[in-house]
Image: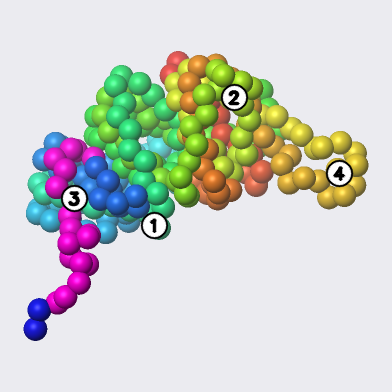
Amino acid sequence: MPIHGSLFHDFKENASPDPFSLQSKKLLKIQMGYGPVWAKTGSMVAYQGDVRFENKGSGGLGKMFMSKVTGEGVDMMQCTGQGELFVADNASEVQIMYLENDAISVNGNNVLAFSSSIEWDIHRIQARGAAMAGGLYNVALRGTGYVAITTKGDPVALDVASAPTFGDAQAVVMWTAGVSMDIRVDTGGLKSMVRGGTGETFQMAFGGQGYVLVQPSESVVAGGHQATQSSGGGGLGSLLGG
């Protein structure tokens, strides 16, 4: 007996030949014919063809040591072979970008996949308020190739050059090269402290030239610039120079 309905038509595989493309807002399709890719460990939901996976952990002893020290959640697997690979992360929205000899700083928990041509590392960020926050860490991605990150809901990209820009450390996902970051401590004054505070004590202050991506959910709490209970992330200035 045939199956009636539009299910298999409405959700038919995306035929895009691009190296990285969206199968849906929450599912990334990767064409493996363009070469190896790095993907978040455990993010594979399906593949067609001959795709192999090698667990690289945090990408070597140096990065593994940094991962243990910082709590940075960047366990990656290397994917090789031919065919189509589909990856996702807890039904979060997927955002795709192409870097052309450029760099970004991303919360480690939001990294989903990137081309093998992209260099990556875990960095401690040099910011004046970082010591007060307990130490700040992010993942630096640089080079030329595709990068896919995840957000909880549709994000907003803020141009930091247009106005003083501040973000909640639990909502900031990433920022581009040319953006500087510092930690701002705002207790709200004595009256606010007596009443229990605002819950917005540590804020991330951005300057320079570029964009900051902020998601509509305060869920950036593991594996990224949330190295401590109430800390925020860092900037790319020291990442690009180090």
Three-letter amino acid code at disc 2? Phe
Residue at numbered disc 3: 14
List the residue tagged with mark 2.
206
Q: Looking at the image, which residue is at 56% across and 42% down?
A: 171
Residue 205: in magenta span:
no
* Residue 127 is at least partly visible in this image: no
Which of the two discs, 4 and 3, labels the residue nearer the N terminus?
3
Structural crowding at the residue carrying mark 4, measured as other residues with C-alpha within 10 Å and reported as few (<14), some (14–19) or many (≥20): few
Apparent side of residue 145 relative to residue 165 in the rendered image (left or right):
left
> Residue 13 sits in which quadrant?
bottom left
Residue ID for mark 4: 193
> What residue type is disc 1 on?
Ala
Answer with mark 1 or mark 2, whichever residue precedes in sequence.
1
User: Given the image, on which type of amino acid does mark 4 rest?
Assistant: Met
Percent position (x, y) of residue 130?
64, 30
What secondary structure is found at the residue carrying circle 4? Answer: helix
Q: Is residue 237 above or below residue 168?
A: above
Region rendered in magenta: 3-20
User: Which residue is nearer to you in this view: 66 or 101?
Assistant: 101
Q: Is residue 93 above or below residue 10?
A: above
The answer, for residue 33, to whether it is visible in the render is: yes
Magenta stretch: includes residue 12: yes
